[in-house]
Amino acid sequence: ATETTLKEQKFARLMERVAKDREVYKMSCPRLVELIEDGRAASPETELYLRDKFSALDLAQVSAVVLGCTHCPFIQPVLRRIIGDGPLVLDGADGISRHLHNTLARRGLLNPRQEPGEILLINSSGEDSLLRLSLALLTSADETDAGDPIPCPAGTAYSPEQSRSGLRPCS
């Protein structure tokens, strides 16, 4: 988590509720956001950084790792190399997705379509670098079918294969 997350009242309440009979080690990882936003989520530098952070722990005693920042899901493959397959990895995005699904269902707004939809990347800052980063994070090599187009705000279809070729998205 970030230092800010660890200081939040919401985090303190969650700790009171969940950590009653567990030993919890709070780990601030301030460089993760920078590494991820620089496009280095899967880099050796990120792995070294995380190995150093986890070096103080006896990993055989770790039953779960909670990802406490919206950036953290992007480092899961690196994290797994460090902690192994044993510990659970708990990601807040799962709960957010379930909450969104339940809210849409309650309001009758779920899309009944069975076929895959499209992803529309919109960036209010106007910075192409943020669109490229978003596309790169969402189309990691092990999760992407290079043939699936990703529509852009300007209406230009932009495929993950184009991303790897260095073409500018959504121009």
Image (cartoon, helix red, strand yellow):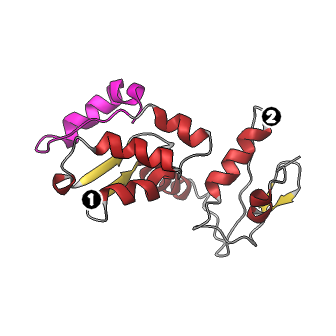
Number of numbered labels in the structure image = 2
Mark 1 vs mark 2, foreground winner is 1
Q: Name the residue under label 2.
A: 126
Separation of marks 1 and 2 at Cα, in angstroms: 40 Å
The amino acid beneath tag 1 is Pro
Q: Examine the image and state in which quarter residue 124 appears.
A: top right
Q: Where is residue 49 in the image (x, y as percent from the top left)?
A: 41, 41
Residue at 63% over, 70% down: 112
**Residue segment shown in magenta:** 1-28
Residue at 59% over, 67% down: 143
Residue at 53% over, 53% down: 42
Near-viewer residue (3 or 52) = 52
Binning the other alpha carbons within 10 Å of mark 1 as few (below 14), some (14 to 19) or many (20 upward) gives some
Q: Name the residue under label 1.
A: 87
Task: Please state if 51 lies on the left or on the right of 131 as rendered.
Answer: left
Near-viewer residue (103 or 147) = 147
Near-viewer residue (45 or 42) = 45
Does residue 129 belong to the magenta stretch? no
Split into 4 quadrants, where in the image is the N terminus? top left
Q: Where is residue 142 in the image (x, y as percent from the top left)?
A: 57, 68
Task: Please state if 2 lies on the left or on the right of 113 as rendered.
Answer: left
Q: Position of residue 87 (x, y in %)?
A: 27, 59
Please say whether residue 99 is visible from this viewpoint.
Answer: no
